[in-house]
Image (tube, rainbow, N blue to C red):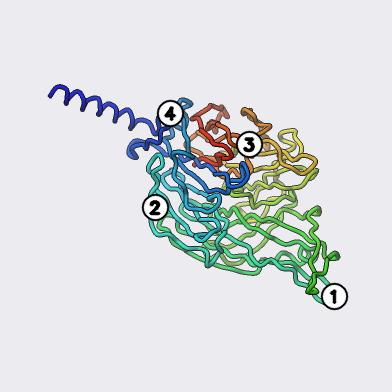
């Protein structure tokens, strides 16, 4: 009887010890008790498919408590112990502000366009909550999307970009190049489609005559007033005077992306998704659509702050722009020039996060003379003072953040996962008020894979 009681005491003590931590130091796949975490932190990793770092083999996720995320004695191996998110390629994940829900729209494949909401339960335990929503009939099987406001997702797609011309061979006259935009809004709390729309994505007559078109939209955000949605844009250009003629007699106009127009953003009324308008910055020429990550944020002051990238070699590097809360147009009196702020050349913002009170954290690379993005760097930016301070992280000259998706904020903690491709790394924690940096949980990697976000 005493032995039985003693055994029960040991088991009870072990259970208590386990419940206080979301994963053991050896990370053997244990899953924490969901009632014990003050706030879940979810890390995501992308699997290699063909080439190291390509991320096309799918996505794994694993959650741990915020306390464990900050603990350098904790180890996490998302690839061995996490859950595989539904997606034939890299999942485009979003999360609720409290960390309790993860959202995903599957990208490409037979199930491309399917939306799922997951409840975070700790470790590899994520349960689907609500209906699976099919968006492919509106935004195809490969939509681009983000959480545009708490509880609201916006998915976008640009399709059928074609050149319109007049005349007969060989005397063709270019008119414009244009695609069709498809946009929908999603209820993330009770998964369902709210509103859909599609329309020809026309630019100004002047831009179209010069050969410009918008080929991609991404990174929507809903303004503080809740009556506008801003959507970043990737702008391309052809030379209207140069073309080749195919065997069937149709012309293909020559790409001319060396010439740039001002950065663009598509603006729609919300929630109706009507009255499309394209606004233009005079402070930047880069794209504003981002790559699998958010580029626009509503600031504490109500203005929208937006990163640009891909300006081209010698074009001055990435900028942070401002869209006025009063006019819903670019405030062209404002720009934070990252090159100038950091005394670097040809910076390229991979992603960033507004963390409150005019402060942001930027993840960037540097573009070399051949046009290749090199290194992976982090800077703390003060949007009010228009300044930036680089922070030092190990191996930054050889890092690659080109598939990075999300920076997490929990109170005053800003969390960024930093791992070289195929190598171990850590969660880094920055105090959003002081800028102080500490090293958190260790991230165990596998050959060819990479960690791409924290939520």
The residue closer to the viewer here, 49 or 256, is 49
Give the mark nearer the N terminus: 3 vs 2. 2
Q: Residue 201: which quarter of the image?
A: bottom right
- Spatial separation of the CA atoms under disc 3 and disc 2: 39 Å
Q: Which one is closest to the eye, mark 4 or mark 3? A: 4
The answer to whether residue 88 is visible is: yes
Labelled disc at residue 169: 1
Which of the marked residues, 2 or 4, is nearer the chain's N terminus? Answer: 4
Q: Earlier in the sequence, mark 4 or mark 3?
A: 4
Point 32% across, 39% down: residue:
35
Q: Which mark is drawn over residue 75? A: none
Q: Are marks 4 and 3 in contact (CB under 8 Å)?
A: no
What quarter of the picture does the N terminus occupy? Answer: top left
Q: Secondary structure at mark 1?
A: loop
Mark 4 vs mark 3, CA separation in Å:
39 Å
Return the residue nearer the eye: 40 or 353.
Answer: 40
Q: Alpha carbon of mark 2 to alpha carbon of mark 1: how far?
A: 56 Å
Distance Cα–Cα, label 1 vs label 3? 55 Å
- Name the secondary structure under disc 2: strand
Neighbor class of circle 4 (other Cα within 10 Å; few <14, some 14-19, many 20+) is few
Q: Say the numbered circle drawn on residue 382.
A: 3
- Compared with residue 178, is residue 447 higher up or lower down, i.e. above or below? above
**To which residue does mark 2 refer?**
128
Q: Secondary structure at mark 3?
A: strand
Q: Which residue is mark 4?
A: 26
Task: Tell me if residue 427 comes above or below residue 372 in the rendering.
Answer: above
**Measured Cα–Cα span from mark 4 to mark 1:** 69 Å
Q: Within 10 angstroms of label 3, few (less than 14), some, or many (20 or more) residues?
A: some
């Amino acid at each position: 009887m005493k032995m039985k009681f003693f055994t029960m005491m040991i088991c009870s003590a072990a259970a208590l010890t386990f419940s206080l931590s979301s994963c053991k130091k050896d990370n053997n796949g244990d899953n924490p008790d969901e009632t014990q975490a003050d706030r879940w932190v979810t890390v995501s990793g992308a699997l290699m498919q063909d080439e190291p770092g390509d991320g096309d083999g799918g996505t794994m996720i694993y959650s741990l408590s915020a306390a464990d995320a900050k603990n350098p004695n904790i180890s996490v191996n998302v690839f061995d112990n996490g859950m595989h998110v539904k997606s034939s390629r890299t999942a485009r994940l979003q999360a609720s502000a409290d960390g309790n829900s993860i959202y995903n729209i599957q990208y490409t494949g037979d199930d491309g366009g399917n939306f799922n909401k997951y409840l975070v339960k700790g470790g590899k335990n994520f349960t689907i909550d609500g209906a699976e929503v099919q968006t492919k009939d509106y935004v195809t099987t490969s939509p681009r999307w983000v959480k545009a406001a708490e509880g609201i997702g916006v998915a976008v797609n640009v399709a059928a970009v074609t050149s319109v011309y007049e005349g007969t061979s060989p005397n063709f006259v270019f008119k414009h190049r244009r695609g069709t935009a498809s946009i929908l809004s999603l209820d993330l709390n009770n998964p369902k489609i709210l509103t859909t729309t599609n329309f020809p994505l026309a630019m100004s007559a002047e831009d179209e005559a010069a050969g410009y078109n918008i080929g991609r939209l991404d990174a929507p955000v809903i303004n503080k007033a809740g009556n506008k949605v801003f959507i970043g844009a990737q702008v391309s250009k052809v030379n209207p005077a140069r073309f080749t003629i195919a065997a069937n007699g149709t012309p293909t106009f020559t790409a001319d992306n060396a010439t740039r127009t001002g950065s663009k953003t598509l603006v729609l009324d919300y929630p109706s998704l009507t009255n499309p308008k394209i606004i233009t910055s005079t402070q930047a020429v880069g794209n504003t659509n981002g790559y699998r990550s958010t580029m626009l944020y509503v600031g504490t002051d109500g203005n929208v702050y937006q990163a640009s990238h891909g300006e081209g070699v010698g074009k001055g590097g990435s900028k942070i722009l401002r869209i006025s809360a009063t006019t819903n147009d670019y405030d062209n009196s404002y720009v934070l020039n990252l090159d100038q702020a950091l005394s670097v050349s040809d910076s390229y913002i991979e992603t960033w996060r507004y963390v409150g009170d005019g402060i942001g954290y930027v993840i960037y690379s540097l573009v070399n003379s051949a046009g290749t993005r090199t290194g992976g760097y982090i800077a703390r930016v003060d949007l009010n003072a228009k300044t930036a301070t680089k922070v030092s992280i190990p191996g930054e000259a050889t890092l690659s953040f080109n598939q990075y998706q999300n920076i997490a904020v929990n109170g005053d903690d800003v969390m960024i996962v930093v791992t070289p491709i195929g190598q171990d790394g850590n969660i880094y924690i920055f105090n959003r008020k002081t800028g102080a940096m500490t090293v958190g949980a260790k991230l165990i990697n596998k050959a060819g894979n990479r960690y791409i976000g924290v939520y």
